[in-house]
Amino acid sequence: MAEPQEGPLSERIRLSLMDDISTGALPPGTVLDEASLSDTFRASRTPVREALRQLEAAGLIEIRPRRGAVVLPLTLPRILEMFEVTAEIEAMCVRFATHRITGIERAQLTELHENSRGAAEDGDFAAFDGFNLAFHEGLYRATHNGFLVEQALALRARLLPFRRTQLRHPNRLRVSLSEHEAILQAMSQGDADRAARVMRQHMANAGTALARYLRFDNT
């Protein structure tokens, strides 16, 4: 009975630590001790260990034998460089997807977008974050280019904590929703160039929202 619960529990631990690292609540150099984390989250070491492995895969921490896990340094300029590269990859995805998306895929994206509207209007950060991830992944897969999907997902995994954090900036949920709508509209009109431009700006705006949120949060 305990095993099925460990997946969701490790995910909750991962998200909590990921948010604390990406917002600076756990600064670089912080040692994450398994025993202390188990006490904090009232969990066994198994889900804690799994959460730490996922954070290491995302490049947020380094697990050092017999020394625990250590939060790695990552500067805002470096993160914004990652957003810049991501913007180009996702613009390429949208450009391809505009002409390759199937009717079913278009309907699924539209449904995701409409379902996210309530979360944006209610300021439900966690719910919108889930819809946002599904929306972008749907765009990747609509390219019907397996290699591009792999690269987009790998880059997203590396930037995921900060893509999540930028949604916390005031009014970012509503703005992100409107940007998604503009992307879908350009795609529905077969305008791949405009869809790519909107996506590129969407990601640039995400990077800006992150920078503003972190500066605001730290003042």
Image: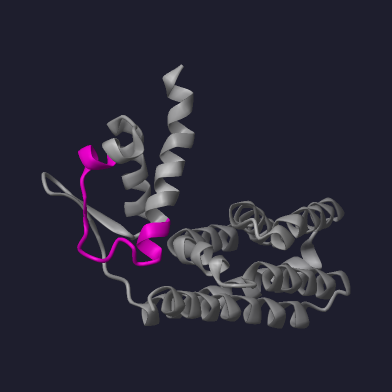
Q: Is residue 174 within the magenta segment?
A: no
Question: Over which residues does the magenta segment extend?
Answer: 19-37
Q: Is residue 199 left or right of residue 70?
A: right
Residue 18, position as x, y percentages in the image: 40, 55
In the picture, residue 98 is in which quadrant?
A: bottom right
Q: Give the percent coordinates (x, y) of residue 191.
A: 82, 79
Q: Can you give x and y, in whole percent of width and height, for residue 131 in the image?
A: 67, 54
Q: Residue at x 40, y 66 (%)?
A: 23
Instruction: Determine if residue 197 is in view.
Output: yes
Q: Identify the image's colour scheme: rainbow, by chain, secondary structure or one colour.
A: one colour
Question: Can you see residue 155?
Answer: no
Q: How many marks?
A: 0
The residue that appears at 43% across and 23% down in the rendered structure is 3
For residue 66, above or below residue 209: above
Q: Position of residue 106 (x, y in %)?
A: 82, 57
Q: Is residue 24 magenta?
A: yes
Q: Residue furthest front?
A: 219
User: Viewed as shown, does residue 165 lie left or right of 92?
Assistant: left
User: Which residue shows up at 48% across the image and 59% down it?
Assistant: 154
Above or below, 31 relative to 167: above
Could you tell me which residue is drawn at 44 percent across and 35 percent down?
A: 9
Residue 58 falls in image quadrant = bottom left
The residue most toward the left is 66
Q: Quadrant of the C terminus?
A: bottom left
